Structures are given as C-alpha cells and as structure tokens.
Amino acid sequence: MTDYFQTFLLEYLEAAELISVLLNILISILGVFPSAPLTFVNVKLFGFWNGFLLSFIGEVLGVALSFWLYRKGFRTLVHTKTPSHSKWLKLLHLQGKESFLLILSLRLLPFVPSGLITFFSAVGRSSFVVFIFASALGKIPALFIEVYSVYHIAQESLQGKVILLVLSITLLFYISKKWKKKA
C-alpha cells in the first residue's frame, strides 16, 4: 500500500500535498484502513516536520468530516437498535469533560483504531467542538510517535531497527495471547 501511495503522489507531485491531505480524509471516512502507510510516505517524500504537518492536517480534517457524516448517518440507527441496558449505551452518554478526557486518552494511543473513536463519539452525545479539540490535542503526541517511528524505520537507523524489534515482539505477544485464548 505504501508503494501505491508513493507512486501516486510522485505522479502528481505538484499537487501531492493536497492529494495527501485528501487521501487522509478518505482513510478517516472509511474508518477501516490505517493511516500509517500514508504517514510513512508523507515523511519519506516531504521530510519529518512537513510529513508530520500534512498527516496531522489530513487526520484532523478527516475525523471532523467523519464525525459529521457518522452523526448524520448512524446516530438515530444506533440509539434505536441498542438495548437500553447495554453497557455500550452508557458510553454513548458521555458529554463535556468526561467525553473530552475519554476521547483525548484514546487518541493518545497511536494504534487504537481512529475510526472506532470517531464512530462512537459521533453517535454519542459528545459535541463536535469537544470531539475536535480532544482529537486534535490527542493526535499531536500519537502522530509524533508514529512519524518518529516511521522516520527512523525509513532511515534504517539503529533506532528504527529497535522500534521494529519492539513492534515485532509486541505483535508476536499479542498473537500468542489470542491463540492461547482460543485453545
């Protein structure tokens, strides 16, 4: 996927920054694809800080548009189809400070699926303003960690190799726990 993004952006280099932001918005709306491959390409093509800034702008605009679309399309459906005793419904009732803190804390974790955070925030009672501020504030450190990791992996530095080793061990640990649960 990374090669596809890179080839596509290089083909339209004069508009590559705008296209990158639009691709990030599309990834956010779809909510099932990770943005890391595009972040990787942004860092590789535009450098550390410009890649970070492009990814940040695209992700914040993407979650804003996704929030609006999800709220318009799914809010009524979720509230009418979710049983009133469901624990999920309790999560949907958070507002104000509690909503801000939950969204912020989830955004701080770089590998929590962004689409899920956006979806549950949109169908819940969180206001658009609270959602955007918490999302933008939480995405800064999470995206910085992602960009830093991607940058060093792309540079094939010692730090990049250590990051890949830690990610690989974490993934293997996660998979082995899942297998043990099934057995």
Image (tube, rainbow, N blue to C red):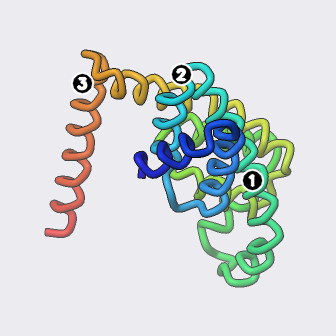
- Identified by mark 3, the residue type is Lys
Residue bearing mark 2: 47
- Residue that appears at 74% across and 40% down: 100
Of the numbered discs 3 and 1, the one sitting upstream in the chain is 1
Of the numbered discs 2 and 1, the one sitting upstream in the chain is 2
Q: Secondary structure at mark 2?
A: loop
* Image quarter hosting the C terminus: bottom left
Of the numbered discs 3 and 2, the one sitting upstream in the chain is 2
Q: Is residue 124 left or right of residue 150?
A: right
Q: How many marks?
A: 3
Where residue 81 appears, as percent x and y from the top left, is 69, 83
Query: Who is closer to the viewer here, 127 or 56?
Result: 56
- Residue that appears at 78% across and 71% down: 75
Q: Which numbered mark, 2 or 1, is in the foreground of this view? A: 2
Residue bearing mark 1: 94
Q: Which numbered mark, 3 or 1, is in the foreground of this view? A: 3
Q: Secondary structure at mark 3?
A: helix
Where residue 98 appears, as percent x and y from the top left, is 73, 43
Q: Is residue 43 left or right of residue 15?
A: left
- 3D distance between C-alphas at marks 3 and 1: 41 Å
Q: Are marks 3 and 2 in contact (CB under 8 Å)?
A: no
- 3D distance between C-alphas at marks 2 and 1: 39 Å
Residue bearing mark 3: 161
Is residue 118 visible in the rendered structure shown here?
A: yes
Query: Who is closer to the viewer here, 154 or 59?
Result: 154
